[in-house]
Amino acid sequence: MKSKAQFFGLCAAWSLALLGSTAQAALPVGASAPDFTTEAALGGKEFKFSLAQALAKGPVVLYFYPKAFTSGCTIEAHDFAEATPKFNALGATVVGISNDSIETLKKFSVEACRDQFAVAADSGARIMKQYDAALWVKPDMADRISYVIGPNGKLLYVYSSLSPEQHVQNTLKAVQAWRAALPR
């Protein structure tokens, strides 16, 4: 009987680990960031976002989120909006990305992002697939993964958690570390 209980205990622990884990196949630190250009919105206005053009100005904080106007994604957008001036002061660009339509993102860029940073549309989930940022259980939706990409196109930092709580704090620390390591 004891071995049967141990077996079920192990199965329960394994199931909880799978359900609770967001650690997935995110691209590793040091990998080259796949380049992309896509529709984006900032302050309700549509434009073409180019990763290469943004990297020419400095590092990019690229964060994937599941769906605009959901509670966690709105919290995360508000947090990034509040921190965007700090990122900008360090020379970094912030951009969020999801599989939402550009029309939805125009509204989200004003209401949740508070006109502070761009949000990009990933029609067909092609960008999230390149970044291994698709949600395991729903591959047409992004997982909550944040990347800091150096101006050289290499990933400096990766953070994956369905909780929106630490994404801004962690990516800001990574950008600050990048800035501190620059020659004076």
Image: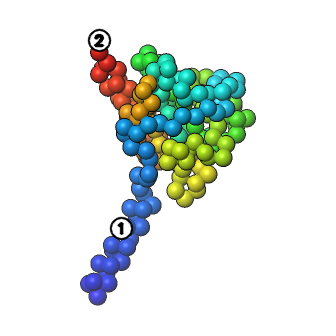
Q: How many marks?
A: 2
- Image-based side of 132 in relation to 121, left or right: left
- 10 Å crowding of disc 1: few (<14), some (14-19), many (20+): few
As drawn, 167 above or below 46? below
Q: Quadrant of the N terminus?
A: bottom left
Q: Which mark is residue 184?
A: 2
Q: Residue at x 27, y 83 (%)?
A: 3
Q: Residue at x 63, y 43 (%)?
A: 99
In this orientation, does residue 93 appear? Answer: no
In this orientation, does residue 30 appear? Answer: yes
Q: Nearer the viewer, residue 97 or 182?
A: 182
Q: Are marks 1 and 2 in contact (CB under 8 Å)?
A: no
Point out the tag, 1 or 2, that comes first from the N-terminus.
Answer: 1
Q: Quadrant of residue 20?
A: bottom left
In the picture as drawn, the residue positioned furthest to the top comes out as 184
Q: Quadrant of residue 157?
A: top left
